[in-house]
Amino acid sequence: MKLNNLIERGDPEKLAGDFQFVEGPVWQADGSLLFSDIPANRIYRWTADGGAQVWREPTGNSNGLTLDREGRLIACEHSGRRVSRTEADGTVTAIASHFPSAGSGDVLSLSKGHPNGGRLNSPNDVVVKSDGVVYFTDPPYGIKPEEREQPVNGVYRILNDGTLELLVEDFDRPNGLAFSPDESILYIDDSPRRHVRAFDVRPDGTLTNSRIIADMDHPQPGSPDGMKIDKEGHLYVTGATGVWVFEPNGELLGVVVTPERPANCAWGDDDRCSLYITARTSLYRVRTKVGGHKV
């Protein structure tokens, strides 16, 4: 397969600009896109009619955003050092902030000097499995070295009873993550190592059989960051020069070149064939021929 079988060619359309550093786009059922401006401590809401408007401020310097099964916003907060959920009444609650946490299924005390658990580093990106379990990455990008309370940059999951479990701890800086359409594979990228790893998902939701499936090393600046999956299982991973598109087995099909280096992406519109891309100071859109896997 070639990239032009998946992408309607043409320059990405710029929808909005003059932000500081945008991330974490997610499409909502009401026909709007939410995305974070991390340094500005804001979440914006974009619509075709109204453009980009501030939706929430402050946000705990939110980064990755997604929706749970009830359509509630799940946010990774850098300065908040937590994963939060926005309830139906607008109340924002923390669903993970410390590890080990009260009720944690992992009895290994990783945070010496913090008997009640240390704070997370700075949760970065997040996905929700169809059973409601939340998976997220926790690199230290949003904190100073001396502020660290976790000795690893982990991949975690939050069970439906609130239990927080550490799943993988051997990443340098885990970042974007996405499930395959059938949820049998979880893809996670490691930014400094500039590659994407795949894990088989066991029936109980834990991970096994780690392997590198995509090398994203490139002479230009930019490391793998956010990622999404289309209905056919193709990976769309932001990196150097644009959005890299891979077959499920890691074969590179090509790059959607963007005017600014992208950080994340998400499908939207009624047909889920518009790929919205957050790239440094701007929001862009390209049309795809294969729709995105629904969040």
Image: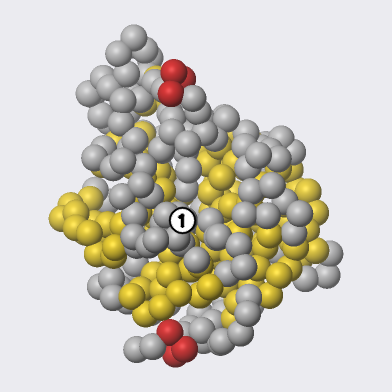
Residue positioned 57% across, 30% down in the render: 79
Q: Residues within 10 Å of mark 1 (few under 14, many from 20)?
A: many
Q: In this view of the protein, can residue 207 be seen by the observer?
A: yes
* Residue 231, placed above or below residue 59: below
Residue positioned 41% across, 78% down in the render: 254
Residue positioned 26% across, 37% down in the render: 169
Q: Residue 247 in the image: state x and y as whole percent.
A: 32, 76
Image quadrant in which you'd find residue 146: top left
* Residue 136, placed above or below residue 239: above
Residue with the mark numbered 1: 222
Question: The N terminus lies in which quarter of the figure?
Answer: bottom left
Image quadrant in which you'd find residue 214: bottom left
Q: Residue 108 in the image: state x and y as whole percent.
A: 22, 23
Residue positioned 74% across, 38% down in the render: 57
220 vs 186, nearest the viewer? 220
79 vs 223, nearest the viewer? 223
Q: Residue 227 in the image: state x and y as whole percent.
A: 44, 61
* Residue 139, placed above or below residue 293: above
Residue extending farthest left: 209
Tally of numbered tags: 1
Q: Residue 17 in the image: state x and y as whole percent.
A: 74, 59
